[in-house]
Amino acid sequence: MLICVPSSRLILPLTSTLLVLLLGGQTTISIDIHRRYPRAYIHRHSLQTPRTRPPGFGQQGPAEVFHLVNDITSLIHGYRDDSNQPPTVLLHNRVPMKDGLEFYSVPKKLIFEKPPHFTADNHFSGDHVMNFIGERGFGITLTCRRDRLPGELKKFVHHEKKDSSDPRVKVMKYQQPICCIKQIPATESTKAYTKTLVSFQSTGSTNIAGVNNLPSLSLYVMEKSRGRGGAKRKWGVEMNEAREIYLTHYSGIDAADHMIKNAGIRYITWKYWHAPYLHALSLGVIAAYDMYRECCDGDLDADWEIPERKRMSFADFRLLLSKQMLEYSPANNEYAGDEKFRDNTRATKKRRLTTGENESESTFPDTGVTMDNLEVASRSRLCEPCPKLRSHFQHIQKASNDKPCEVCGRKCRYWCTLCKKQMCTNPGRMWDGAQCAFLYHSEEFFGLSLSDWKDVQGKSDPTKWTPPSEEKIARNARYIERLKGGTM
């Protein structure tokens, strides 16, 4: 049923709001309005094979909305896929499966309690986009392009450009906006939703479309002001609920762009691929500042609350961030990947340990060892399975004859009397940390040793066994971890 009325009250719930916006020229990103946390994004490039345009979504903007909505759907509480399983995200670590190498999936963190509301510009508009959004229970508010208006409504709404000198334009400033409403009932696979189209001429040939977005619609005046003190001036502008929802929410784009400009993370280069990287780096700084402000609010932890007047501004935050970056050295070993830097690898073992860790491990309070001391020592000194491993190492003795090692396959004369297996302790009379003995007694090597090996027919033939590579040992370790966690 289609209803066209000058003004109407619509009682529809407004959910939490997201922005779908175009940033950086080649990236479509969905971010929160007030916190500016990126939730989903699509970077435009010719190798975007997983992001093919689905049937009915031939235009670039609607196709991107299709994929972004699917990404956001998996972040909503209660979401289940077609097999009634919770959402999963693909990681880069590979594990051995029957059909070859496949990705290992782990649960994804859910963020939204209910489907959020999107706000977008006319690049993403279209009647098919609104149907797709509404059938899945989302809401959206977006400006509607004149070439994407519903066919049966085009003759009733404003779609032609008007000259400002035309007297009809001034008359329309005092008329109620046109509101078109269409309610679609629910089906077995889709949800019920309400589509709206608001048209008004005074600010141009403006049409704002939406799904589940308008609690009411009327014409009123909003006060605007600029300047300070005696130079402050005020004036009124025409407004209605649809225009206010769009402008209020979409202003997050201007705020994000302004903060990206203030970050100043840019330089002149012919390498065009640096631009999206610098843009993403700026977004990361902005998100970090919003995280800082969220912590200062005290909702996460009351001890973190800081009054508004004492919080760092975005400029002070960037200055402190730059200072920490310039003063930091990978030799501190405080972040993942620091051990790969040249400043760290060329240093002696004693210098690789940070000063803070050494002090935390060796300096104990009067009451004795604390949990902080224990956590630091567990990363550099303590080994949890040490008692069991020590028991096996104490039972390694010299045998009377040479046999192949269970790990490397070389002939050796040492064996574990508890396991009844041969293994190297110092191959070639050179101390290597007893790697073979350690590997044989570790979980990551279980199933790969000489005595564990079996061919495709299930027969054990030591002459066909070969020592496993480091990559195979790493894959087996991940397989054992999943086996222990019950995710097989």
Image (spheres, helix red, strand yellow):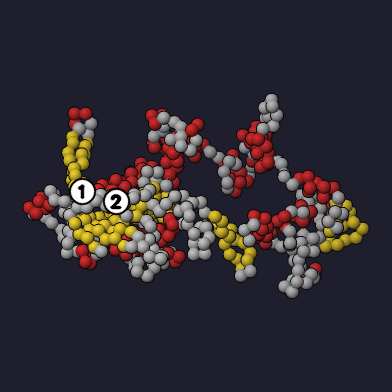
Q: Quadrant of residue 6?
A: bottom left
Could you tell me the amino acid type at mark 1?
Ser
Instruction: Please report the residue visible at 29 percent of the width from the left and 60 percent of the height from the top.
Output: 183
Q: Quadrant of residue 227?
A: top left
Furthest residue to the bottom?
457
Dot label at residue 218: 1
Furthest residue to the right?
400
Graded by Cα atoms within 10 Å as few (under 14), some (14 to 19) or many (20 or more), the crowding at tag 1 reads some
**Mark nearer the viewer, 1 or 2:** 2
Q: Which residue is mark 2?
A: 11
Dot label at residue 135: none
Instruction: Please report the residue visible at 73 percent of the width from the left and 62 percent of the height from the top.
Output: 448
Q: Is residue 49 left or right of residue 192?
A: right
* Rendering coords of residue 240 (x, y %): 22, 48
Instruction: Please report the residue visible at 37 percent of the width from the left and 70 percent of the height from the top.
Output: 55
Q: CA distance from mark 1 to mark 2?
A: 13 Å
